Image (tube, grey):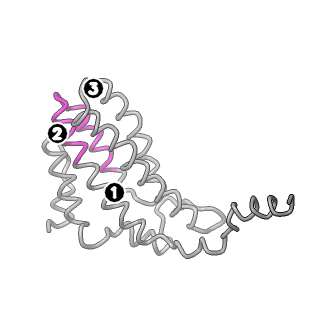
Amino acid sequence: MPAKAEIRKIATSVEDVIALLDAERDAIWECPPDEVMAMCRGEIPRGTGTKNTYLTTLIFAENELRTFTDEILWFAWELAAVKEGADLRTLQLYMDEMCQYKANMIDFVGLPRAGELVKEYVGGVNACKTLDEFARLTGAAMTYINRLHGWVDMAFPWGVTHGYTRSNPLDKIVKAARAAQ
């Protein structure tokens, strides 16, 4: 596994960005990155959170990573790699806009290194000359963000949701139907 210092180089080409994202993914494959561990301790670099808490920050981090990988990256990859007729320039414009926003939000919720890597991805997207390059680059970004999301998802305190259970909505319908008989 490469050392952190080795993988923090500035990417200068599409291939460099793919290599950077792959190295970062490999570096966090078996252990979560330090920024996720810090987030679990409530150490959020931007101080993000409501009323001196960080649960909302974890909620936003989990959501931002999930929607980024499961919706934005997947959709763009599928258009470039699977579907026919995608236009590279349109994909570049779309991804530049969406991913700059996501990079800033990912940084804001406590994952500044991940935010930097998303900006590296955007640089790579804008350097792509073919849909194949775009698909390979987006695939690398998707697998990195998927792994990062997996760590945040595992760290999320899902047990707190037990305090917010609701009754089965069908019970209300059945009770109303029985009362009407």
The residue at 46%/59% (across/down) is 62
Label 3 SS: loop
Residue 152, by quadrant, is bottom left
The residue at 16%/28% (across/down) is 129
Residue 136 part of the magenta segment:
yes
Query: Image quadrant for the C terminus?
Result: bottom right
The residue at 21%/42% (across/down) is 137
- Identify the residue under disc 1: 113
Q: Is residue 114 above or below residue 129?
A: below
Residue 134, by quadrant, is top left
Q: Is residue 88 above or below residue 115?
A: above
**Amino acid tagged 1:** Arg
- Identify the residue under disc 3: 86
The residue at 31%/37% (across/down) is 76
In the image shown, does 139 or 96 lie closer to the viewer?
Answer: 139
Which numbered mark, 3 or 1, is in the foreground of this view? 3
Range of residues picked out in magenta: 116-139
Label 2 SS: helix
- Identify the residue under disc 2: 14
Looking at the image, which residue sits at the far right? 180
